[in-house]
Image (spheres, rainbow, N blue to C red):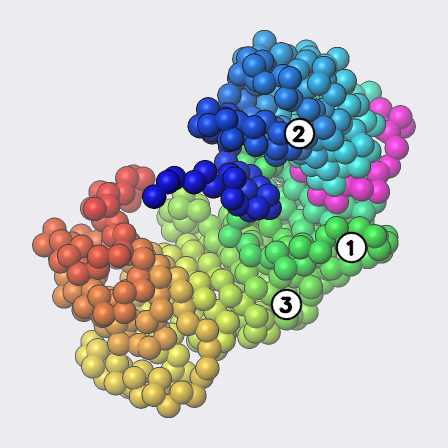
Amino acid sequence: MTNIDFIKILPYHILNFIFEKCPLRDLIRYTRVSKTWRSFLLSWPGLFHDLSDRLLNIPRDLIHYEPYFDGNYVRTVHILGRSKEEQEHILSFLIQHDCSLIEYIRIICDTTKITQLGHLFKTTGSSLKRLHVYSSGTHCILPMILNSCTNLKELHFSHSAESFRTLSSKDLQLENIRPTSTIQQLSLDILIPLPLLKNTLRLFPYLKRIDLNALAVEDVGGLILKCLHTVCSNLEHVQVDGEHTTLATTVTRIKIAKKEEAEEEEEKNLTIGGGGWRVLILGQISGLNDTQVAPLLQKRGKTLEAIHIVACEDLGDATFSTLAMIGCPNLQYLCLRLNYFMYEEAKSANYWPIHFQPKDLCKIIRQAPLLEEVNFSYLDNITDGVLDALADLKNLMELEIGYCENVTTKGLCRFIYQQHNVNENNNDNGDHSTIAAQGASMNQQGQRARQELKSLHLLGMKGVTDQVLYAIAQSKDTQALKSLDLGNNEQITETGLKTLVDRFSKTNTLKWLGINHCTKIHSNAYEYACQHLNNTNIYRTNMKLGYNISLSR
């Protein structure tokens, strides 16, 4: 049968769909396949849609294609990894070819090239919607960006602290910058005093998302939150983080996307007015305490859909009692945790940061029926009662609990079986058959319809024993598990692991199993798991805690 070139027979919209998935470097190679391919690709508007210096040297590699190059087709540009000279050539190339319809630029730049940068931003000023700038040098180009790029919706701006002093009002010259109604997402990682930050934020009256590096602002903690509350009345997504160096970093596991899909439509109806926060991310911020946070939550916390609080050591009872009082009926994601080093320090000092009353956390959970993902790690005050509250959730799909020493084996089994009416006087002598029978009976009655757990991570838990593994193996509520992490549990044995393996070898659903640092699970049990769980990635190493080495088959 004669080979038929699919370029000749497929309709244009299908060819467009196929080739738009390919990077430019591959597309250029494809022009050598045949005359038909070359003719189509060189006339196809999508060929130069996405330019990146990570994939090719833009001026040098495109020189042979200049007769076909049209700057009006370029929509995305990444200038990230080349030398200063090559970056200069790329900027000149874009300006010379009048690439005036670019919608997204991501650039690492030296502000010694400020003249060329100014020309680029003026050329693309009316079309540019998203801009990520990581700059170094002695100049702050933020005013130039704001004055040139008049239709920006998203701006990420970071300036190297190593080569730039704290900004002053002379650097920004706010009186020469017009407020913009278009920017709705702003990420800033620059050394700036709080009063100047406050005046800068006044330039963005319709801001919906803010991402700040708390370490880059002279005054930190609750003062930043108070500033955001008073100046940015339309904020929905608040991230103040003291851990990252560039604010392109976000909490990617927050699955709050449904409303963001309609942002372009919302732009038509922008109004200034007080509203509630949807996402609150606070990470390792010094000076953040209850007296600053609790009043803000009382005013803007009821609408929260995601709460992510990590290593904020001075937060305590008042913050969480406020959340319990106002309720968060839209909450889908909840993360409260320390990091490992704070956990070790707290254990030795017998003082626990992020302190709260378990009853307040239970109330928050029970008032949040939409909760899908929960992460509690390195917290002393997570109890069996908190697990009971979690077990009532009908939408819970992902749960991570790590190093919570007050959670017992019985509490974990009860959570797994979704059984809350267990008699407190039941015999807890380690006989897993009694609890298993109770759980199986509960499941058969079908009294509690709910989403099935997809991910369960139980790290470093004293309460995780073979009894818990038996419960997981026998409960119908865990049969859909895709990810199960039992790392750093020295109590579980090969017998418990084999019971799990036999169970999941029948369902074929488990894709990831972690048994790191489980010292009682030896190589023979590991090999048994590998043989019977053909579609599961199994991670095992018995090195000491703190090493980040994982071995998989």
SS state under label 2: loop
SS state under label 1: helix
For badge 2, the amino acid type reads Val
- Vertical placement of residue 82 versus 334, above or below: above
Say if residue 550 shows up in the picture. yes
User: Where residue 58 sits: x, y (%)?
Assistant: 57, 18
- Vertical placement of residue 77 versus 541, above or below: above
**Residue that numbered label 3 is attached to:** 330
For badge 3, the amino acid type reads Asn
- Residue 266 is labelled as 1
Of label 1 and label 3, which has the lower sequence position?
1
- Determine the image quadrant of residue 120: top right
User: Where residue 44 sits: x, y (%)?
Assistant: 61, 33
Span shown in magenta: 172-196
Q: Nearer the viewer, mark 1 or mark 3?
A: 1
**How many neighbours does mark 2 have within 10 angstroms: few (below 14), some (14-19), or many (20 or more)?**
many
State left or right for residue 322 relative to residue 467: right
